[in-house]
Amino acid sequence: MKTPFSKKTKAAKKPLTVDQKITRRNFISFGTFIVFGSAAYGGWKWLYNSPEETATVTAGARKPLRRALNKTELAFRRLFSNNNLVKTYPKEMAAKNVRHNSDIGSGGKIDTAAWRLQVKKQSGEVLKISIDEIKTLPRTDIIYDFKCVEGWDQISHWGGVKFSDFISHYKLDDHAQLEYVGLETPDKNYYVGIDMPSAMHPQTLLAYEVNEQPLPLKHGAPLRLIIPVKYGIKNLKRIGSISFSNNRPPDYWAEQGYDYYSGL
Ligand SMILES: Nc1nc2c(c(=O)[nH]1)N[C@H]1C(S)=C(S)[C@@H](COP(=O)(O)O)O[C@H]1N2
Ligand SMILES: [Mo]
């Protein structure tokens, strides 16, 4: 006759000994290790074997990684607002000895009197603007923490015209409806692409002064970009020309695999 306490049930309920418990735990953790380990290895293999992105304005990453980067860029761009201002500092906190970095396309001398900023309009017309003319536009100062991707930062003081003031002065508002701005050095050896919201950000300057003095050659005379919402790499020195486009303009460091957006 069967009772609720048949031998079988009792045997199953018998508590495990300490040794049995340990063996069981080891088995479970080893199993977990195998399962997740294989998954991780599989994932890595998948990434490793996935094709490289086709070289365009960015290059070198595996396709799925670039997709992930572009997705994060989109998320950041949605968060980005021209009402978010980068932190600024009192003038006294600005470095007296301003750090100097690379000079691709901005090394050597330049005749700043002969220099003209070329603005390439959609119509094909090219505006040619002298530095003296740019200096007559409304002037703005910014003292902020300049950050280089190489790992240094420094509070520095720049003066110039807001990019957005420059746009309205030269009646380029229709051009500012496009998605990107491209900037190049006169010799075209250094070039950057900037998304329009960042270019039109109220703290973005076409700068011709540092510490209230005309820009020295090493900081990009006669005119450079100061764009506090981006890393140093986007702050092109010695601007030769500016253009507008709905496609990403070529970008020197993005071609080397750096993040195209390079936002802060
Ligand atoms: N033309 C030109 N602009 C440039 C560079 C460059 O090599 N050439 N380097 C960029 C980088 S990586 C940084 S950090 C800043 C440095 O500016 P600074 O030399 O005035 O400190 O300039 C940016 N603009
Ligand atoms: Mo940099």
Image (tube, rainbow, N blue to C red):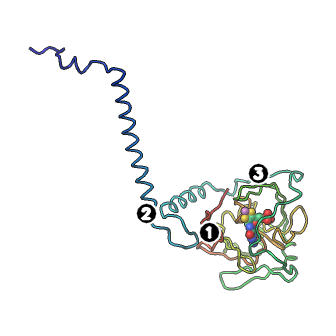
Which corner quadrant of the image does residue 172 belong to?
A: bottom right
Query: Which residue does the numbered mark 3 point to in the structure image?
Result: 87
Which corner quadrant of the image does residue 154 belong to?
A: bottom right
Amino acid type, label 1: Gln
In this view of the protein, which residue sits in the foreground, 150 or 240? 150
Amino acid type, label 3: Lys
Q: Nearer the viewer, mark 1 or mark 3?
A: 1
- Tell me which numbered mark, 3 or 2, is placed earlier along the sequence: 2
View extreme (front): residue: 19
Q: CA–CA distance between discs 1 and 3?
A: 30 Å
In this view of the protein, which residue sits in the foreground, 182 or 12? 12
- Tell me the element at label 2: helix
- Whether residue 167 is visible to the viewer of this picture, yes or no, is no
Residue at left offset 74%, top offset 75%: 171
Q: CA–CA distance between discs 1 and 2?
A: 21 Å
In this view of the protein, which residue sits in the foreground, 52 or 26? 26
- Tell me which numbered mark, 1 or 3, is placed earlier along the sequence: 3
Residue at left offset 73%, top offset 54%: 85
Query: Which residue does the numbered mark 2 point to in the structure image?
Result: 49
